Every structure is written in structure tokens, then in C-alpha cells.
Amino acid sequence: MSDAVLIERHGSILVLSLNNPPVNGLGLALRTGISDALDKAEADDAVTAVVIKGAGRMFSAGADITEFGTPRSLADPNLPSVCLRIENSKKPVVAAIHGVAAGGGLETALSCHYRVASTKTRLGLPEVTLGIIPGAGGTQRLPRLTGVETALKLITSGELAPAAKAHKLGYVDEVVEGDPLEAALAAAERLAASGELRRTMDQDDKIAEARNNPQVFDDFAKSIAKKARGFDAPFACIEAVKAAVTLPGPEGLAKEREIFKGLVTSNQAASQRHAFFAEREVAKIPDVPKDTPIKEIASAAVIGCGTMGGGITMNFANAGIPVTVIENDPAALDRGLETIAKNYQATVDKGRMTAEDMDNRMGLISGATEMDAIADADIVIEAVFEEMDLKKQVFGELDRLSKPGAILATNTSMLDIDVIAAATGRPESVIGTHFFSPANVMKLMENVRGKKTSAETIATVMDLSKKLKKIGVLVGVCDGFVGNRMLGPYLREAGFLLEEGALPSQIDKAIYDFGFPMGPFAMMDLAGNDVGWRIRKRQRAENPNNLRYSDIADRICEMGRFGQKTGGGWHDYADGRTATPSPVVEELVVETSKRQGIERRQISDEEIIERCLYPLINEGARVLEEGIALRPSDIDIVWLFGYGFPRYRGGPMFYADTVGVKTVYDKMCEFYERHGELMTPAPLLEKLAKEDKRFADL
């Protein structure tokens, strides 16, 4: 008997403890141990019932991630057969659940005859977030306990519900304070005495209604169509739950397994697994050891109460950290604080926050008009206008007024952190914290290390990212860092495609259909075209050259078309939000082609994707060569969480591996021949292509 399952006797009840730390992943040894222990229980007349519990801090978080993609993950006994073995036990089996029961962990519990959970437990089936469906009976058993519509919501969202909600919805039988073992033993005794097994697959009442109303599946698919756009797994989940309603039990289980196997080897599943692991890898900094001291951030200050400053301020309040926001203009401060209150009120109005929570968070925010209000802050984040001289001036003040040991951070999206740090006498305490707009919503933080930024400062800010519920990615100093630097070629080629024959609406639609939440021109309209205009003017002043340049974006700004906020940009916005093609811009585009002597041609959506994304990937290769990003997967995280790169494609560097690095390189060579120096393939891209390697091999 493997140590993966620990066995104890409590009177006539056999207690099995899942023992595969840290999360009791259901690897082959654990699955074998459960199956063998049940055989032992059935063969022992002195055993009347079985309780399954988790050792350590949880019941089970599901599959053993160390077995992902290996033959062991599907080796016998596989999880579906183990779950059937539990359900078909001749003696009652009770699940004593604490901590987390997720994925295969919950499927194991659902196959038991009774479920007891402690109050702080969270339970759910998050497989959809990995591009697959539950594959061990989850889509067949859950609807029999909760009803079809509830099961569809739980399975397609991947929600881990608290125990009280799971009890209310029907997939937990009993909730208790503290250790659930005692209550589980009592339930096992009751079931043994009654002879009742309560097999989940035998329960039919809660799926009968859907049998008479098959429209429920089409209606639900329509309800998630926008949110789940492009993803295969949510709609496969619906198909599997439908099988629970329309097929006999064994056939439904077989159909679920068939769907699962079809998805698990797909590009989407591989991409979403990659994203899952990349999120965990991003926190590992080779030259910042795990035992690096982390400073306590008990209070914060934010300089500037505009759109970014207000959003950053909200992040600290949301994390329970007192924060002072400083704005030298009292009227601007009042407007900023009012906007913060309106944002919170909107969340309350949607039922996502209580009025009490709003009051608590607003109570953590104070405003000031004098810089000396930063004196006690453990971290100060500057969020003023994106202009180097102003930032240097502000950091000189921060250096003078901040307490010793305080971290001084800048929210710059493009500027040189080392130049900013040089304005202080403590460059080791200076770091970039590039929040993405809207800062209170977007999960990415590009944390930018300067040449002299200390390991302690880096470790503290990476830890702070987690406390603010952000994904922190450590990057190096260059113009635009990782995300905005790679954005440059993407936007550049979109502009050139306009000159060559495309229109903004066509390019936006092609990129949207690829999976982005919006195309490049809609994105610029949302952010404000004047933002990019200022950046382009600075870059051209600092680095003048004779390379091809499209001036359409500049001319749009000269017309005062800054985007949604002015009612028009690349597109028109009659209602302030909905984009419609702009005849003025389309006329400008055609006129520009004529002025430059470019004969307009038909441009396919395929060319749009390649012209926009392959140069972006090529720039990512340069970012890696220069050490600006630590890993290809870090670049993927930046683009997944900062720019809406479709998760089911894994991020730009993983996507390159999917289509083939050589494919990208060959196309870049073709682009170089046709379009010149701006399309020069990166040396790293060339090297990987010629060695038949992937970015994942780095």
C-alpha cells in the first residue's frame, strides 16, 4: 500500500487520508492507493463504511500537475474509474472536505455517497480555465445534485464556491465548523446503519426538467457567447452536461470522456496550460533569492489623482492598506476623489460590493495637496504626466521628503527608470510599477528594475503585486519596457496596412476575430490618441531617422480626434462608446495612399494577422536577447494580462511556437524583402528557426 493514501481505523470505519502534498494532486500513486484501500474495505467484514479526507491543508486541488501531458495522467487506474469505484462501493463512502476540493478533487467527492465540508472550504470544477472539461464524471454528477442551469454556470465559469453556497446549491450535504472528520464519521455511521448508498449517478429528479426543456442548452450557450468568445471548452462543457440529460448514465460518462480526450490534446488546452504555469513561473527571479527580506508596506502614498493615480489609489484601499493621494490642485483632488467614490458606487449598484465595504475602503483613502503628506508612507507611487523633466522634479521632492527605507516607484509606461532614479540619492529604492489602465481593473503590473534597484526593493514590490491582486512581471529598462515596446511594431504595421489598402474597421475586425478584445484602432481610441501622439513626437525627436513612417495617426490628432473622449478618433462614436466607420478617416486614409504614390490593393485578414503579430513576436525575440524579459513566458503574461492577447492562444511567444518559429521567421524574411529594414528578423528568431527550436526551449 502506497504512502500516498494513509489508512486509519475509527471503530468500524476506515478513514483514507489523501497524502500527496502540497495539494493532494490525484496522481497515479494516489489513485492506486484509493482503489486498493476500497478493495481492502470491502474485503473486511469489520469495516462498515469509508471516509475519504485530505491530509495537510486541503482535500484535493485535482489532477497532479507534475503528470500533465505524461502517460501517468491517463494510466490505470485513471480518475474516472476510481470515481466509479467509489460510487459503486458496496459500503458507504463519505467525503470529509476541508480547504479546497477542485477539479478531480471535487469529482472524487461527488462520487462519494455523502459530503461534509468545513465552513472555509471552496469547491468547484475549474477545468474550463485549462481549456478542458471535467473528465471524471463532474459534468454528469453535478447537474444531478444542483440542477442543470446551476451546474452549467458552475462548470463553464470554473467558480470555486464557498461551502455555504455549495450546500445551498446541493452539492454539499452538510457544513460544519472546523475539522469535518467527526461529522463525516457520524454520517458514515448513519448511512451504514440505514444501508443507504445515495449513488449520485442514480439521482434523476433534478435533471428531469431539462429533459422536457432542451432549449435550456441553446439559451445558456447564447448567454455566455460574448464572454466565452473564441474558447472551445465552455461550449464543450454545455455539450457534456447535455449528455447527462439526454443519455443513460454510462453513456453520458462515456460521452464526457470522449469530449475530454478531444480537448486535452488541443492547441487551446496546451495554450491555457502554458498560461497556468507561466503565471506561477513569473514570480521566480533568479538573482533575487526566496529568502530576500521583504519590507512591510503598511501605508502608501500616490502622487497624482487623475485616471491612473485614482485607480492605483483604489488598489491599495482594496487591499486594506491606508493610502494618501496627493494632488497640488484642490479642485483636481476633489474631482479625483469623487471619481473614486463613483467607481465604488457603481460596483455597489451592480451588487459586487456592499455599501459597508465601500465605506471601509473610502475610509482608507485620504487626500492632500502638500507633498510632505508622504512622510510616513512605506511606498510612494508617482503617477503624474508622462514627461521626464516633471518626473525628475517629483522624484527629487520624494527623495527629500520620504522617510529612510521608503520605496519610490514610478508609474511610467515608457520612460527610463535609471534617469528618474538618478534624480534621487537612493537609486536602490527606485523601481517602476507600471499599472495598466484602468488600474483598479487590469491585473498586470510591469515592475521595472533599474541598474541600481536593490533585491529587497524588487522582492517587496513583487510581493506587493500579489497583495494588490495583480500579476507582477519583472522587466528591465528600455523604451516601452516589454509591453509597449512590442506594441510599437504592432501599431506601426497596422498603420502601414492602411496606406496599402486596408481600412481601420477591417483591421480591427481581423484582430478581434483572432481573439483580442478589440483591434488596434479601437484600442487607441479607448486609450486616447493624444497619448500615443506625445510618445511618437518624443521618440522621433530623440531618434530621428529616414525609415518609413505613417503620419495618418498624427493627422487624426491634429484634427482633434483623440478617440472616445472627443466623440471621434479612428472611428466615430455618436453615443460615446460604440464604434462606427468614420467617412472622414477613410477619406484621409485613401488620400494618404494617393499622396505617397501607393497603389491600394486588396488585403486579406490573414495578411493583417501576420503583418501585425509577427513583427510583434520578432520584437519579443529582441526583448529576450537584450535580457529585458527574463523568460518568453513572462512576455506572454504581459500580453495576456495587459493587452488582451487571447488566452486560448497562450501569448505571443507561445503562439509563435504553435504556428512554428520557422514559419514566423520565413514570413519575417519575406516581409524584410518587401518592406525593408523595419522588418529585419531578430537574431534570436533566426537562430531558433535554423536550429528547429522553440521559444519554450530557451
Image (tube, helix red, strand yellow):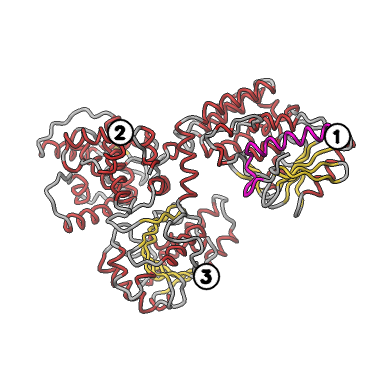
Q: Secondary structure at mark 3?
A: loop
The answer to whether any part of residue 213 appears in the image is: no
- Residue 30: horizontal and vertical position, in percent? 67, 39
Where residue 365 is drawn, which disc sits there? Answer: none
The picture quadrant where one finds residue 190 is top right
Of tags 2 and 3, the one toward the viewer is 2
| Neighbourhood count class around disc 2 (C-alpha, 10 Å): few under 14, some 14–19, many 20 upward | many
Mark earlier in primary sequence (2, 3):
3
Camera-side residue of 521 and 349? 521
- Residue 476: horizontal and vertical position, in percent? 34, 57
The picture quadrant where one finds residue 93 is top right
- Residue 287: horizontal and vertical position, in percent? 42, 60
Q: What's the distance in space between the residues labelled 2 and 3, CA to CA?
A: 50 Å
- Which residues are the magenta region? 20-44
Q: Secondary structure at mark 1?
A: loop
The answer to whether any part of residue 303 appears in the image is: yes
Q: What's the distance in space between the residues labelled 3 and 1, CA to CA?
A: 58 Å
Q: Amino acid at mark 2?
A: Lys
Q: Amino acid at mark 3?
A: Ala
Does 446 appear in magenta? no
The picture quadrant where one finds residue 195 is top right
Mark earlier in primary sequence (2, 1):
1
Height in image: 577 above or below 437? above
Label 2 sits on residue: 662
Report how many numbered discs are placed on residues in the image.
3
Q: What's the distance in space between the residues labelled 2 and 1, CA to CA?
A: 61 Å
Label 1 sits on residue: 44
